[in-house]
Amino acid sequence: MEAELIILLCGILLISYLLDLSSKFTRIPTVIWLLSMGWGLRQFSIYAQIKVPDLSGVLPIFGTIGLILIVLEGSLDLRLNKKSLPLIGSAFIMSLIPFVLFTIGFSWVLVEVEVCHWREGLLNALPFGIISSAIAIPSVKNYNERVRNFITYESSISDIIGVLIFNFFLITEIYNFSSIMGFFGEILIVVIISIGITILLSFLLSRMNHHVKYGPILLLIVMLYGLSKLWHLPGLIFILMFGLALSNLSYFGEWRIAKYFRPEKITAEIKQFSDIVSEATFLIRSLFFVLFGYMIQTEDLLNLTVLPWSIAIVFFLFLLRLLFLMLTKQNLNPLLYVAPRGLITILLFLSIPAQFHLKTVNQALIIQVILMSILLMMLGLIFYSERETISIENEED
């Protein structure tokens, strides 16, 4: 049995690699194939009457590690300069305001339909408002730099804001000035701690001479995120800050402290570290989406009871996106379509305590919304013309 499992895992990852290579030409996001592969494996196991142990407990673990690595990989590719500030500002607006408006609107609907408390409505609505960086960032890796940077900033900020607000409503029972100030105080604490840890990890990266060094640093990053999650602190802020600090280390070259980081050596170390992160991200992401596809049940896909809810949710998500892309004067093509729900939506849905679960928000609704948003992204990217964007940008310049 061990040999068959090894062959299956290696086969899945090799097929995932080939699909990743082909996505540049087909413009079909790899996640579509991975989900289909997982669903197909489930149908085969049912047909062949193969007993498979319950894998639901493994999904959040892969999801959390995948989220850390994807945000880290995306931030390691970002370069900060004066020209990027307007782009960051637009990405921040796009990740915050549509999210807040949708969450408030959907929460109100849930409160009216389910006759529940606002806290329950918010906890159930929040997962749908967050863009999945785990799907969005890899899906645009073959497109121009402006599209890649915008999606990386937007989806990473969306993840951070979504997790922050979700944790706030999850652990806070009384909402007043004191609880809100405590919330912002936690963010400030994490930012200060993140600066210190970033300096420490960068120093270790430049000083470690052992042949095994990238693995321990990655393990430290994952462990620190785990600790922050245990204490309900926004650990994704640390991940984003660490990646941005490493990718923009050249800006600190004139500082006196820079000489202790061996600038002549650390640039090459960062390049190798980034390559290792990319490899690890590919493996974890592939396994997560195949596993998620395996756990999709056909009856959830064909659940006509929740289908009107799914269509309405996706419609309003993309309507808000359209309006705010126009307000921030961004190119609609392809940014309008790249707003998938996925990994973070699943993780937050699984984090809702049983006593706060609402009947309307169930596994079938989550799956349908995720798949609809991914399919819309796929169609948008298939018909996306890069020449149109380039010509528009040239006219703006």
Image (tube, grey):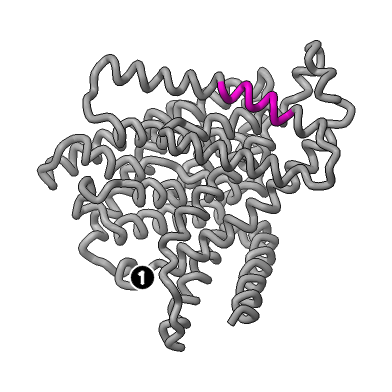
Q: Which residue lies at the image location 60% right of the left edge and 76% below the top edge?
A: 5
Q: Amino acid at mark 1?
A: Gln
Residue 55 lies left or right of residue 279; in this view the side is left
Counting from the top left corner in percent of width and height, residue 13 is at: 64, 66
Residue 308's place in the image compared with 183, above or below, is below
Q: Nearer the viewer, residue 387 or 236?
A: 236
> Quick one: which residue is furthest to the right in this view?
264
Above or below residue 319? Residue 79 is: above
Quadrant position of the C terminus in the picture: top right
Q: Describe residue 292's horizontal placement relative to residue 72 as left or right.
A: left
Q: Quadrant of the N terminus?
A: bottom right
Q: Which residues are magenta?
A: 193-202
Name the spot of residue 69 as percent of width and height, x first. 60, 45
Q: Residue at x 89, y 27 (%)?
A: 264
* Location of residue 393 (image quadrant): top right
Q: Nearer the viewer, residue 346 or 40?
A: 346
Magenta span: helix, strand or loop, mainly? helix
Front-lying residue, 207 or 104: 207
**In the rendered view, would you say 249 is above or below 67?**
above
Q: Looking at the image, which is closer to me, 6 or 338?
A: 6
Q: How many residues crowd around disc 1 within 10 Å: few (fewer than 14), some, or many (20 or more)?
A: some
- Image position, residue 36 (x, y; %): 49, 69
Residue under the image location 67 percent in, 33 percent down: 78
Q: Position of residue 180 (x, y in %)?
A: 32, 19
